[in-house]
Image (cartoon, rainbow, N blue to C red):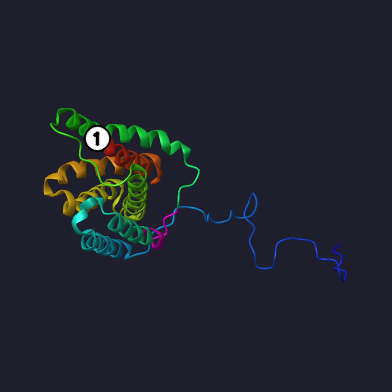
């Protein structure tokens, strides 16, 4: 016998009319915390924004070259805005990214260290104090990785796979250095970009590449 619900007392829970129960329990809820798939058309917009950011840096740089603080910060801000607009998340609590990042940084420093050992003359270092230079370099390196191995990598990955994502990021990484260091650096910078892309693929996000890029750039002060 089914008792009618009394006023103030909810009716017993049960299957609603017209609903179908799954064997073994209710249907599982859809996952909502997975990786965000970039919207269609994101890749062309990111590439256009990247070209504009590089052009902005070239316009601001003046005679200071790649060591211009104003140009570097403007470039980092532009890339950061693009990354945030693309939905890149900051990989917090990624302590596991530190060791792989430092290991790659050490590897990337080998050519510069060998060149310094065989070079003649005094070291060339940027003007200003190390702390000021290091702070700007760290901001720029993190912004570049948030864009290249974050937003751009994800946009290419979802449609063309990890190999293409690493390759596109490597070419973009080499291209942004051409206005300041010349075309003769393209091969080296493509190789560095590929290493950072592979590290991104292995570790799953852009935290380890950001550690590697920042550490290698900071070490460059002593290797010039």
Of the pair 118 and 55, the residue shown nearer to us:
118
In this rendering, the answer to whether 52 lies above or below 201 is below
Residue ranking furthest to the front: 128
Left/right placement of residue 58 relative to residue 201 reads left
Q: Residue under circle 1?
A: 223
Identify the residue shown where x is 20% and y is 33%.
Answer: 111
- Give the secondary structure at mark 1: helix
Residue 116 percent coordinates (x, y): 19, 32
Q: Is residue 15 left or right of residue 187?
A: right
Q: Can residue 59 be found in the magenta stretch?
A: no
Give the quarter of the figure containing the N terminus: bottom right
Total count of labels: 1
Residue 178 % position (x, y): 17, 52
Percent coordinates x, y for residue 108 in the rendering? 26, 35
> What residue is at 26 percent from the left and 54 percent from the top?
68
Q: Quadrant of the C terminus?
A: top left
The magenta stretch spans residue 87: yes
**Residue most toward the bottom?**
7
Whether residue 62 is situated above or below residue 98 in the rendered picture: below
Residue placed most toward the observer, 17 or 154: 154
| Rendering quarter of residue 62 | bottom left
Q: Nearer the viewer, residue 151 or 22?
A: 151
Neighbour tally class for label 1: few under 14, some 14-19, many 20 plus, Cα within 10 Å: some
Stretch in magenta: 83-89
Q: Quadrant of residue 5?
A: bottom right
Q: Residue 185 at what x, y percent from top left?
A: 15, 45
């Amino acid at each position: 016998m089914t008792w009618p619900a009394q006023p103030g007392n909810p009716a017993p829970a049960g299957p609603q009319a017209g609903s179908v129960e799954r064997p073994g329990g209710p249907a599982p809820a859809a996952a909502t915390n997975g990786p965000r798939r970039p919207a269609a058309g994101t890749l062309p917009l990111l590439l256009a924004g990247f070209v504009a950011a590089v052009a902005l840096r070239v316009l601001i740089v003046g005679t200071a070259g790649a060591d211009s603080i104003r140009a570097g910060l403007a470039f980092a801000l532009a890339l950061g805005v693009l990354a945030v607009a693309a939905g890149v998340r900051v990989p917090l609590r990624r302590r596991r990214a530190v060791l792989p990042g430092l290991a790659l940084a050490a590897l990337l420093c080998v050519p510069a260290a060998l060149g310094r050992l065989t070079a003649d003359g005094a070291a060339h270092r940027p003007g200003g104090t190390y702390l000021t230079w290091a702070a700007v370099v760290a901001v720029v390196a993190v912004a570049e990785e948030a864009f290249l191995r974050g937003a751009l990598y994800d946009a290419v990955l979802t449609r063309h796979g990890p190999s293409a994502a690493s390759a596109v990021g490597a070419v973009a990484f080499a291209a942004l250095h051409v206005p300041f260091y010349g075309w003769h650096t393209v091969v080296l910078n493509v190789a560095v970009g590929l290493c950072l892309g592979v590290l991104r693929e292995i570790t799953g996000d852009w935290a380890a590449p950001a550690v590697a890029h920042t550490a290698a750039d900071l070490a460059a002060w002593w290797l010039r």
